Amino acid sequence: MNQHTERDSIFLEQAEILSHSAREEEQYILRVHAPQCAAHAQPGSFAHITCHPMQPLRRPISIMRCSPREGWVEFLYKAVGVGTQRLSRRERGESISLLGPIGKGFILDPTRPRPLLIGGGVGMPPMIFLADRLHTQPDYKPFVILGSEVPFPFQTRPSQLLIPGMPAGVIATLPLLDDWHIPTRLASRQGFPGCFQGYVTDLAKHWLDTLEPEQRQEVELFACGPHPMLEAVAKLAADYALPCQVSVEEFMACGVGGCAGCTLEVNTPEGPAMKRVCVDGPVFRAEQVFF
């Protein structure tokens, strides 16, 4: 988990589509056979995918899950432009060109054994990937909050895991995480059954306020989602004097640090500097991005 992906560990593979399912609101879950990517992916890393042979410019898509043993990698994406719309029409058995894994991932701190994972919209996949790694590490006690303003891309169900201090009726969860015994709650302003009615940061604040001071000092925040959500999470972390890591999104062309088309101004000990999201990120400390 504390290993950063470098450019010499990025692999080019012809990945066979194993499954490709459509969900509500143009959301899709794609699973491909890409054993090199699966063997080296870390939570927070992504793949650069050729959506269609007639469209050479790749699209960056966050990795949601992978199985190094079985060699598959899974993605959740939303078809919002020509490229991802073309990708959505690709079928099982076809092959797509995949470059990955790319980017620096999240780093866990053993002195902060209560990670709070916050994912919004298509920012949910890195949080699910991180949760997948955490559920095999008994020293950590994660809590996951996922938010969406469109129907969630999975069938929700009432959680079997109790979370002290949760508002009444907030019981909806992602079944996969519940099966991993990772406490998870969902947030939305759309009135979905069992979800917290508000922003993910409102629910996060509510949870933080239920902790004893010594428990709160064991928390570190991890987040991926729209920029305004990340900014709100960074502010929440600062208000509670807690460390926070964010995974940011930028348009990118090459995806491997050559074109510098995805640069982002970040704060460094030497002052503001331009960093490439693809290889210097996509994960940064929150105070680097929001300063």
Image: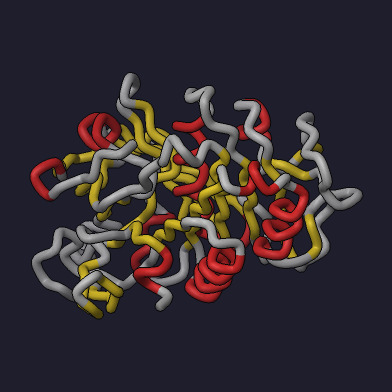
| Residue 229 placement, left or right of 255 | right
Q: Residue furthest right?
A: 168
Tell me the quarter of the picture where residue 253 sits: bottom left
In the displayed structure, 95 sits above or below 227; it is above
State the scheme by which the image is colored.
Answer: secondary structure
Is 30 in front, or is 230?
230
Viewer-nearest residue: 11 or 226: 226
- The residue that appears at 62% across and 34% down in the rendered structure is 177
Residue 224 in the image: x percent, y percent?
48, 59
Tell me the quarter of the image containing the C terminus.
Answer: bottom left
Q: Where's residue 15, x and y in %?
A: 25, 39
* Residue 97, position as x, y percentages in the image: 21, 48
Q: Which residue: 69% across, 53% down?
A: 208
Residue that protrudes farthest toward the top in the picture: 69
Query: The N terminus is located in which quarter?
Result: top left
Q: Nearer the viewer, residue 213 or 84?
A: 213
- The answer to whether one can see residue 48 in this image is yes
Is 229 placed left or right of 97 in the picture?
right
Above or below residue 137? Residue 120 is below
Q: Is residue 234 above or below residue 31?
A: below
Give the image location of residue 221, x and y in percent.
52, 53
Taking 39 as reference, is 233 above or below it? below
Numbered circles on residues, count: 0
Q: Residue at x 76, y 57 (%)?
A: 206
Given the current orientation, which residue lies at the most extreme front position? 214
Nearest the eye: 192 or 139? 139
- Side of 195 where 200 appears, left or right: left
The answer, for residue 26, to whether it is visible in the render is: no
- Residue at the location (40% across, 69% down)? 287
